[in-house]
Image (cartoon, rainbow, N blue to C red):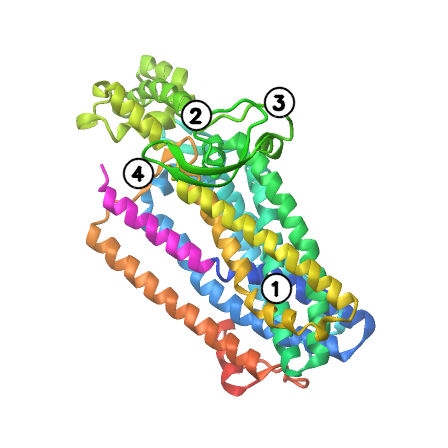
Amino acid sequence: MINPTVVELSRWQFAATALYHFLFVPLTLGMTFMLAAMETVYVTTGRAIYREMVEFWGKLFLINFALGVATGLTMEFEFGTNWSFYSGFVGDIFGAPLAIEGLMAFFMESTFIGLMVFGWKRLSRMQHLLVTYLVALGSNLSALWILVANGFMQDPQGAHFNPVTMRMELTSLPALIFSPDAQAKFVHTSIAGYVTASIFVCGISAWYLLRGRHVELARRSFRMAALFGVLSTAGVITLGDALGFVGAHAQPSKLAAMEAMWHTEKAPAPFNVIAWPDQKHHDNAFALQVPYVLTPLLTHTMTETVPGIDAIVRTNEQRIRDGIPAVQALKQLSRDPTDASALAQFHAHRADLGYGFLAERYAPDDDLSRLTDADIQRAAWDSIPNVFAEFWSFRLMVGMGLLMLGFFVLSTIFTLRRELERRRWFLRLAPWMIPVPWIACEMGWLTAELGRQPWTVYGLLPTWMSASTHSVGYMAFSLAGFVTLYSVFIAVEMYLMVRFIRQGPQPHASAAPPSGGGAVAAAFAMARNGD
């Protein structure tokens, strides 16, 4: 059995790299389409101010994109280095969308981004606009394939387990791609990126307006971002509801943890506005509830029962008992693949194989027949994620979303009424709103990933089985190294961003490409030369 400390350190390392990387992703997703919208106005009107906007915001996008690539590449290697059993178990399925992302989306995005940044003097207006849209398409396609891979981990579709090869095998690529979880999450994540970019542009534009600098560019940028943002925020909230509805059917344990529902209540169930979940005593130490709200919110009906954690644990306890024979049969097949009785036993219980794996960690000497009722019950309670973390990460995400909706509604009203520059208090508030969408995005990913625990692939492969057999010292050293390196990347991002923002847009910026190669070199060259 893998050292539990190694598993935890592997989880911490992947969580750290993922959360660091996702500081760059939303702005990349959102800025591409906002740049495309600005350039569309430039091409249709011919007004130079809109090209100036595209060039200025495009430089900030380039910095973010370059460092986002640097932080993202290592994550794919971590699957092989730190999660080798997982990679072998689901490599046939998980590798396909990642390969497509690299071959189609990433190279498409990387190829056209150079033309977008340095092609102003070499391409016609329409050609350059097409390139900008292709960059936006490539960025979002990249997100699509990554979220298809993640969607399989959340709700495995289009694959089955082969007891002969001892691994998952792809059976339907369309089922994998069009998984309800993957598609809902893709749209939700992409629109969250548009919200992030909108607040980023609004905050910096407000900072310029407060100081009377680059007023024309800031005023127009703020208006476009406000309109972009109010529509995107409404969309992300709507899609969040759809994602919760999908998750209610695919992952009932995640849903119950998000709402701190320890006990099944008669429909329509009350909604916990705030609560203090107590995992040890399986109850809430405190809860402020609104009657009758939870059932229609989650099921869109007034009569459907939402199972509480107690009911889910009872169901999973039975699934564990049914899954144990599947694991026992699998071990026999590993010794003798031609054993017909073992194969029949496996097929009779294969639907609960993952739950049998869940209990295996408590089997004395790896002998499942020696599991006690207490061991099985303990394994059943393991199937429930950390309720406190899940409950509050979800509420922080929702709270940030509502705050941003209010901000964008006021932004749209003030800018359309041409009152923005008279609302000095609002201009002072706007820059402080810049971190809010990043907090919401990070809380959203914590909600999604913590809620999937204790599974790497929900219902199939427990996290405790998935890690590589490294030493504790190796994992501690690599974790410290990654945190240090990624902190440097964040510092570089902040330095370059602040430098460009303080400098402001350059009306006659050179479009000549730098002598060095690569987007990172371009970003540093522009910062050094003041381009």
Q: Earlier in the sequence, mark 2 or mark 4?
A: 2
Few, some or many residues within 10 Å of mark 4 (<14, 14–19, 20+): many
Q: Quadrant of the C terminus?
A: bottom right
Circle 2 or circle 4, nearest the eye = 2
Could you tell me which residue is drawn at 47 percent across and 67 percent down?
67
Amino acid, disc 3: Thr
Mark with earlier residue (1, 2)? 1
Q: Earlier in the sequence, mark 4 or mark 1?
A: 1
Instruction: Name the N-terminal-most of marks 4 and 3.
Output: 3
- Amino acid type, callout 2: Ile
Measured as percent of width and height from the top left, residue 473 is found at: 20, 54
Q: Which residues are magenta?
A: 1-21
Q: Which residue is situated farthest in the left direction here?
A: 365
| Residue 303, label in figure | 3
| Residue 148 image position (x, y, % from top left) | 53, 44
| Badge 4 element | helix
The residue at which mark 1 appears reads as: 199
Labels 3 & 2 near each other (Cβ < 8 A): no
Q: How many marks?
A: 4
Residue at 48%, 24% (x, y): give it: 264
The span from disc 3 to disc 1 (Cα, nearest Å) is 40 Å
**Foreground: disc 3 or disc 2:** 3
| Local secondary structure at mark 1 | helix
Of marks 3 and 1, the one in the foreground: 3
Q: Residues within 10 Å of mark 2 (few under 14, many from 20)?
A: many
Crowd tier of the residue under label 3, counting other residues whose Cα lies within 10 Å: few below 14, some 14–19, many 20 or above: few
* Label 1 environment density (alpha carbons within 10 Å; few <14, some 14–19, many ≥20): many
Left or right position of 413 against 268: right
